[in-house]
Amino acid sequence: MSAQEMEKLKEALLDLNKAGVLEVVSATATTADLQAAKLAVEAIAGALQVVGKRFQEGEWFLDELVYSGEIAKQAMEKLSPILCDETQPTQGCVVIGTVFGDLHDLGKDIFINFATSAGFKVIDLGVNVSVEAFTKAVLEHQPVALGISCLLTPAAGGIPQVIQDLVEKGVRESLKIIVGGAALTEKFSLEVGADAFAPDAVTGTDIIRAWSEGQ
Amino acid sequence: MPQFVQVTLAPSNQTIQVPYGADLKEVLHRFGVEFPCGGRGRCGACRIKVIQGVLPLSQACASILSKEEIDAGWRFACRHRAEQDITFELGQREAPVLTEHGAFHVEARDGTAVVIDLGTTTLVAQLLDLQSGHVLAVETALNPQAVHGADLMTRVDYGLRASGREQLTQSIREKLGELIHGLIALAPSTMDPPGSVLLAGNTVMHHLFCGLDLSPLSQPPFESSQLAARQFTARELGWELPYDPEVAFLPCLGGFVGSDILAGILATQMHDSEELIGFVDLGTNGEIAIGNRHGIFCTSTAAGPAFEAGGIEMGMRAATGAIVEVEKDQEKEVLCHVLGGGQAQGVCGSGLVDAVATGLDLGFISPSGRLRNDHRPFHLKDAVSITQHDIRQLQLAKGAIAAGISILLKEANAGPSDLSAFYLAGAFGNYVKSESARRVGLLPFSQEQIQSAGNTSLHGLKTVIFSETRPDFDPVLEKVRHVSLASDGEFQETFIKKTSFPENERLKD
């Protein structure tokens, strides 16, 4: 894949031209050229960084954010047969879930899309996740970071319980905790012992990237 | 020219002093009078009959009212100002009619009754004459619980704390007791005190008023086993009223769908309609129902306060100085209508929807909601503008409602054009222009389908109060199915798409 083709792929994604993106990656996939596929992945990741920036600057909104993530996901699926053994995430592992008492997964799912594109291996625990399930997943996967989502005010009290259990099991020190969702504020998040508050999925991805690269 | 004039409402003889030249619409709004067309002199719902004093005939009245009506003293309140002492009757209280589809059958009985719309934000109580069906008095107040959280879930959270629920229960009972005493004081002394009190509200309001355990409403699956109608005596609630009337709260339909939706169904007569109809009550929460006599689907969705201009930088309620209407003229200049006619001080919910619709038409706002001019605020009038953030807030609110409607239509196996009518309830629903609501993608219905319905909670309560026998709600409840959006994966996808404006078609494959 030439620099020009990479630029074309990136532009198609930033134009939200799904057919254009899938055409380029399908052509790449048929050549079974591992190097080209890697470059395509690089172009997609680069485009998604621009998407994130546009979102943070207010240029784009949820619809474009989610749709671009969706296109990227489909493109990656086309490329995955060639990449097979090369899909080792470059950034380590993140465990994420929506705290018990809450069933919302919209923000969490956008975050997963962006974190995956940024090279993280993401373990999604789903919604209404218990204290025990969070701790079990942390012990099992030893992630760089744990993400907890919460959109309902009455469920927010579950977050300190999750953190407390991690302290008691002696694993709190070895990982970073990031929380986000409409029911939370930065002040609350830091008071209950989280390391960071994510105002949106894109900023959240930036934060865990900085953590991962800082290690 | 006097500085103040007296406005008196017959037959209750409530008198208020207002500044000379005050807009009668704003004066009467305080008495609970509704203006379905937004005070544009079109619908005639704010008819008043002058008994003492003179109101010069306005053009709108001359073109719509008959000669007999004009001679009898009928005028439209919204087209006049108070320029001398005046006494009049309110047409709206004489004929409590919702729409041409929903006139009440009043089974004449002795005595009076009170109906109360117990809203998350606003409380409205009316004293009714059971003989004539007239509204004798209206009292409104803010819900005193709102200091413990404007939105429902924050309120629930407070109610889960030690003594939190008792506090919330006590404060709402006390406030409503005050309103009822206020109604009795306003009523003509010849009228009997109320023999019964009937309330409607969402499920959280129901549980808090009745003093029930809130915890089932705070966690999945957000259902409660205590949804039934509840009866009290006034004394049990701490109300010292003559004859100790019975107080009843209508039954809830589900955890997030309360008797406000039941009242809306009764008001629009959806449960008896052969044709498919729908309604939405646009407040902090959007309550939506679509159906007919064969089945009704309903849901509620958290829209946030944008429709009430909450969280909007220059947002304000529809009062003097608020931009209530925005349109463009032929030269593509932006025209704003300011309530009271003076300097614009802010924008209300209907003005915000109008402004965004106009901004889209003029190309100032992109189909994705971006302000094209380098994110600089969209200037409306005087010092009032709307910002990028305001547009995003509206996109989230309208996305939630539009997605809710889309999911219910799908459940009903229907398209937007299959509905014979779609009713807009609530204050915002009264003021918003249907073409703007359609333009921003809030409602997928045509202007002919969209109709203002006023306060459907009160209308629904009145259908119960005025009916001959105590109605049996079970046949209605059996028709209703609650669609939970929280656990609906399709809702989230639809919501995201609906945050965009309609022409963003490329994203809708």
Image (cartoon, grey):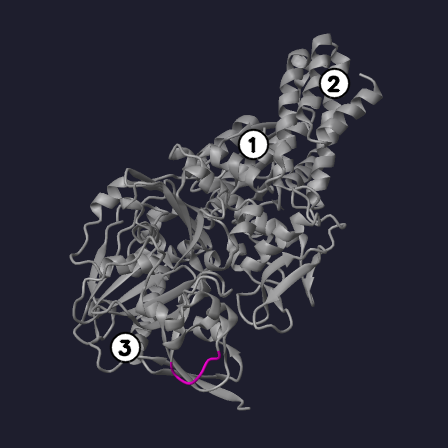
Q: Residue at x 69, y 67 (%)?
A: B383
Q: Which residue is mark 2?
A: A38
Spatial CA distance of label 2 from label 3 is 78 Å
Q: Nearer the viewer, mark 3 or mark 1?
A: 3
Q: Chain of mark 2?
A: A
Q: Which mark is residue B184?
A: 3
- Residue A178: within the magenta? no
Q: Mark 1 — residue?
A: A95
Residue A10: x percent and y percent? 75, 27
Amino acid type indicated by mark 1? Val
Chain assignment, label 3: B
Same chain under badges 2 and 3? The reply is no
Q: Is residue B286 above or below residue A2?
A: below
In the figure, A62 relative to B61: above or below? Answer: above
Q: Which residues are magenta?
A: B51-56
Give the prevailing secondary structure in the magenta stretch: loop
Q: Is residue B55 magenta?
A: yes
How far apart are labels 2 and 1 at the CA level? 25 Å
Amino acid type at circle 3 is Ile
Q: Residue furthest right?
A: A3
